[in-house]
Image: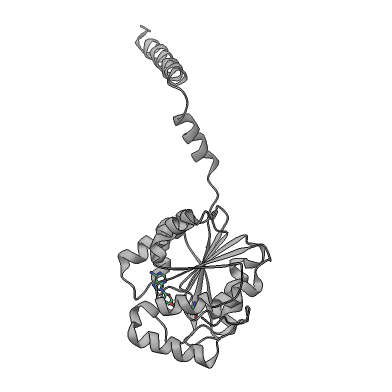
C-alpha cells in the first residue's frame, strides 16, 4: 500500500470527501460531516499538553488530520496510539509514515486491553473525537470508564464535542470539566478537558491500614476495646 508523506496537519479535499462518504454510511458513529479545522487541531494539541507527553492516545482519528497535528507537536521519543473503529479510517491513518505511530482498529471501549497487549504505559494524554451524543449511552460510559482508569494520575483527557453528553457521563469519574468553545470549526464545538487527580493521601493511608498484618490489627482493636472499657467503667462509677 502507498505510504503517505510524514506528519502534516490539516485535511485535504480528498480527506473531506472520504470523511463525508463514511459519514453517510454511519452518521451516528462518525458524528460530523467534516474533519476538524486546523484551529481546533491546534487547540486540542495545546490543551492536552502533547509536547511534553510520553504516550498520547487518540480515540476516533477519522481521516487523520488530528493525528498529524498530534504527531507534529509530539517529542521525538514519544508514542501515539490511535484507536479507530472504522476500518477505512484506520487503514488511512495507518498510511501515515511515522515510527512513533501505532494504529489499532477497534473500539475505544477496549483501551485498557489494547494498552496492556502492546505493553504500553499509562497515557499522559487521551484525546477523543468520539461523538458521545450519538453513540449509545452504555458504550459511551464504558469508553469513559476505560479512559479514566487508563490515564496516568495528573494526565489529561480532552474531548471535542457538539453536545454536553461527555461532560454528564464523565463527571462521576473525573469531576467537573474545563470547557472552551471553538468557534473556528464547522460546526463550532466545545472542548472539554479534565486532569486526572493524583491518589489522595487519606485514601492511601486507609489502603495501607487495610493491608496491615492481622496481629497489628488485633492490637489496634484490643487497644480500642480497653479504652472503651475504661470509659464505660468511668460512666458506671457511683457519684
Ligand atoms: C467526529 S470524528 C473525529 C475525526 C477526527 N479526529 C477529526 O477531528 O477530524 C469521530 C471518529 O470517532 C470514531 N469512533 C466512533 N466510535 C468509536 C469507538 N467506539 N472507538 C473508536 N473510534 C470510534 C469514528 O469512526 C470517527 O472516525
Q: Quadrant of residue 137?
A: bottom left
Image height of 131 relative to 116, above or below: below
Image height of 136 relative to 5, above or below: above
State how the image is colored: one colour
Q: Position of residue 210 (x, y in %)?
A: 44, 30
Q: Residue furthest top?
A: 238
Residue at 42%, 73% (x, y): give it: 130
Image height of 160 relative to 34, above or below: above
Q: Position of residue 189 (x, y in %)?
A: 48, 80
Horizontal side of 22 relative to 79 (left or right) equals left
Horizontal side of 158 relative to 86 (left or right) equals right
Q: Position of residue 79 (x, y in %)?
A: 60, 63
Image height of 128 relative to 207, above or below: below
The residue lying toward the viewer, choosing from 56 and 137, is 56
The residue lying toward the viewer, choosing from 116 and 211, is 116
Quadrant where the C terminus sits is top left
Q: How many marks?
A: 0
Amino acid at each position: 500500500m502507498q505510504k503517505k508523506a510524514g506528519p502534516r496537519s490539516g485535511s485535504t479535499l480528498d480527506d473531506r470527501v472520504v470523511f463525508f462518504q463514511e459519514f453517510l454510511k454511519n452518521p451516528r458513529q462518525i458524528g460530523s460531516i467534516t474533519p476538524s479545522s486546523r484551529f481546533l487541531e491546534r487547540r486540542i494539541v495545546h490543551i492536552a499538553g502533547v509536547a511534553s507527553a510520553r504516550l498520547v492516545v487518540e480515540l476516533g482519528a477519522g481521516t487523520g488530520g488530528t493525528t498529524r497535528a498530534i504527531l507534529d507537536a509530539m517529542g521525538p521519543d514519544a508514542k501515539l496510539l490511535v484507536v479507530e473503529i472504522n476500518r477505512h479510517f484506520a487503514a488511512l491513518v495507518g498510511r501515515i509514515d511515522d515510527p512513533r505511530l501505532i494504529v489499532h482498529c477497534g473500539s475505544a471501549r477496549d483501551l485498557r486491553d489494547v494498552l496492556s497487549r502492546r505493553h504500553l504505559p499509562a497515557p499522559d494524554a487521551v484525546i477523543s473525537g468520539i461523538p458521545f451524543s450519538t453513540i449509545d449511552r452504555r458504550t459511551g460510559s464504558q469508553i469513559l470508564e476505560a479512559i479514566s482508569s487508563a490515564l496516568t494520575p495528573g494526565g489529561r483527557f480532552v474531548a471535542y464535542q457538539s453536545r454536553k453528553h461527555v461532560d454528564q457521563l464523565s463527571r462521576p469519574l473525573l469531576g467537573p470539566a474545563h470547557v472552551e468553545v471553538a468557534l473556528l470549526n464547522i460546526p463550532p464545538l466545545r472542548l472539554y478537558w479534565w486532569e486526572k487527580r493524583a491518589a489522595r493521601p487519606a485514601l492511601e493511608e486507609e489502603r495501607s491500614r487495610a493491608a496491615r498484618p492481622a496481629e497489628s490489627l488485633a492490637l489496634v482493636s484490643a487497644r480500642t476495646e480497653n479504652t472503651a472499657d475504661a470509659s464505660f467503667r468511668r460512666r458506671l462509677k457511683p457519684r
